[in-house]
Image: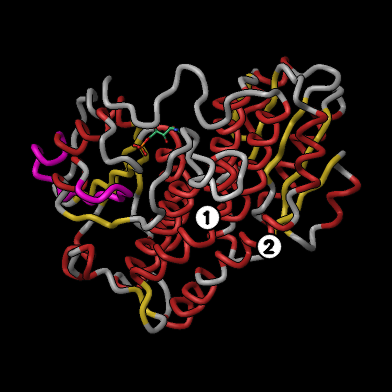
């Protein structure tokens, strides 16, 4: 097993470091000569033009990918997107437009609820597309179309590289759908592709700077509650950051759309409570920071995660973390990395079983 960990103490850290490659390989499987080619997914331009509604259905972190992707798809493609938990979708009685696309996302391709949701969509004669990591898995076999993520085997229960590969697969679908439906210009199309191709190097850069997070995580290893806040894409990334922390460090944490804090949750803020704000979206920065400052005035300790250049954050939060700049549609791929590291380092500081957290299985094949 030590050999399999390639010098890392845990599979999770190894897999965190494999993200640049997972992302590069997944992007490389569809980006050719600066164009996105979805022929391996077997989806035609005619099909792409006809969709009037997109459902994204998944569980856990894969659902968080859907949450982030919905903002990108709705903005670029101008088609309504609904993101559904597979365990809810499969039991909900709802009208579904025949011209819909159901995208299911799953690392294992064996998650029972996601598989059931896929079957339900097929029964209703809706086109299904699966984003899957495991070749030949049940979901891959049963979906009409498959976009394989090339993350390689993921051992750690807490997903990292599969999540990142799923996210870039969704970006590729969004950018290509937008081109085919003429909702972006050719110039925007090539700019988006250029930006997508910068993600692996930028993740690498974040990984080079991980010691600061290790220090910070050790400081908060005894926290009882941690709150993650953000708006839009930043909210989706907060959801993933919160899940990473709770699943491997057993610290209670919640992710909130920042504007929701004052509708109840802010009553939980006490002196010293850690509030982590994700602030990568320029147009939402002021709104989220003001929600965070409301927490600070009630004693919260603030960590702010933003992009290089937004140095004014130093005057507002207690601890700032920066990720490289990139087109803001895709910044989630970068912002998630410090949050993965944070969860990892807290778990290590507490001496927990990082790769096999209690009560959890890598693949949930029962309801
Ligand atoms: C995330 O770290 C979890 N291990 C979990 O939420 C996972 O993403 C979920 O169970 C879905 O699994 P799948 O991608 O294999 O369908």
Which residue matches tag 1?
A: 18
* Foreground pick, 159 / 227: 159
Give the structural element (helix, strand or loop) at label 2. Answer: helix
Asked if labels 1 and 2 touch by Cβ distance under 8 angstroms, the answer is no
Counting from the top left corner in percent of width and height, residue 119 is at 14, 36
Left or right of residue 233: residue 37: left
- The one nearer the camera, 254 or 165, is 165
- Judged from the image, the quadrant occupied by ligand 1 is top left
Quadrant hosting residue 177: bottom left
Q: Which residue corresponds to mark 2? A: 205
Determine whether the residue tagged by mark 1 lies in a helix, strand or loop.
loop
Residue drawn at x 67%, y 65% as measured from the top left: 325
- Residue 256 visible, this orientation: no
Q: Eyeballing the image, is 348 above or below 214?
A: above
Which residues are drawn in magenta? 120-136
Q: Is residue 156 left or right of residue 198?
A: left
The reply to whether the residue tagged 2 has its Cβ within 8 angstroms of ligand 1 is no
213 over 306 or under it: above or below: above
- Label 1, residues with CA under 10 Å away: few <14, some 14-19, many ≥20: some
The disc placed on residue 348 is none
The reply to whether residue 156 is visible in this rendering is: yes
Q: Single out the mark in the foreground, 2 or 1.
A: 1
Q: Identify the residue shown where x is 68% and y is 57%.
A: 206
Q: Residue at x 76, y 20 (%)?
A: 222
- Image quadrant holding the C terminus, namely top left
11 sits to left or right of 49: right
Across and down, in percent, residue 303 comes to 78, 39
Q: Residues within 10 Å of mark 2 (few under 14, many from 20)?
A: some
């Amino acid at each position: 097993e030590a050999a399999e960990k390639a010098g890392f103490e845990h599979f999770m850290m190894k897999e965190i470091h494999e993200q640049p490659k997972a992302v590069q390989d997944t992007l490389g499987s569809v980006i050719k000569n600066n164009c996105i080619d979805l022929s391996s997914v077997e989806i035609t331009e005619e099909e792409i033009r006809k969709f009037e509604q997109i459902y994204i259905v998944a569980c856990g972190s894969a659902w968080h990918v859907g949450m982030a992707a919905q903002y990108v798809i709705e903005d670029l493609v101008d088609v309504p997107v609904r993101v559904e938990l597979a365990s809810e979708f499969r039991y909900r009685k709802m009208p579904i437009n025949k011209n819909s696309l159901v995208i299911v996302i799953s690392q294992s391709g064996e998650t029972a609820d996601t598989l059931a949701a896929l079957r339900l969509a097929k029964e209703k004669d809706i086109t299904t597309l699966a984003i899957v990591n495991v070749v030949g898995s049940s979901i891959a076999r049963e979906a009409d179309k498959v976009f394989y993520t090339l993350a390689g085997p993921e051992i750690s229960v807490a997903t990292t590289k599969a999540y990142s590969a799923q996210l870039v697969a969704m970006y590729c679908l969004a950018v290509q759908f937008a081109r085919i439906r003429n909702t972006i210009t050719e110039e925007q199309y090539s700019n988006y592709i250029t930006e997508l191709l910068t993600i692996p190097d930028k993740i690498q850069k974040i990984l080079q700077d991980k010691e600061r997070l290790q220090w910070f995580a050790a400081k908060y290893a005894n926290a009882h509650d941690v709150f993650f806040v953000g708006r839009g894409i930043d909210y989706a990334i907060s959801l993933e950051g919160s899940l990473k922390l709770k699943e491997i460090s057993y610290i209670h944490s919640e992710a909130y759309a920042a504007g929701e804090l004052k509708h109840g949750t802010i009553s939980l803020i006490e002196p010293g409570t850690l509030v982590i704000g994700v602030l990568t979206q320029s147009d939402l920065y002021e709104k989220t920071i003001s929600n965070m400052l409301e927490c600070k005035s009630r004693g919260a300790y603030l960590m702010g995660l933003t992009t290089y250049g937004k140095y004014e954050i130093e005057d507002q939060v207690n601890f700032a973390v920066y990720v490289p700049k990139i087109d803001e549609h895709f910044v989630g791929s970068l912002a998630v990395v410090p949050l993965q590291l944070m969860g990892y380092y807290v778990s290590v500081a507490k001496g927990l079983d990082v790769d096999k957290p209690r009560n959890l299985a890598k693949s949930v094949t029962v309801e």
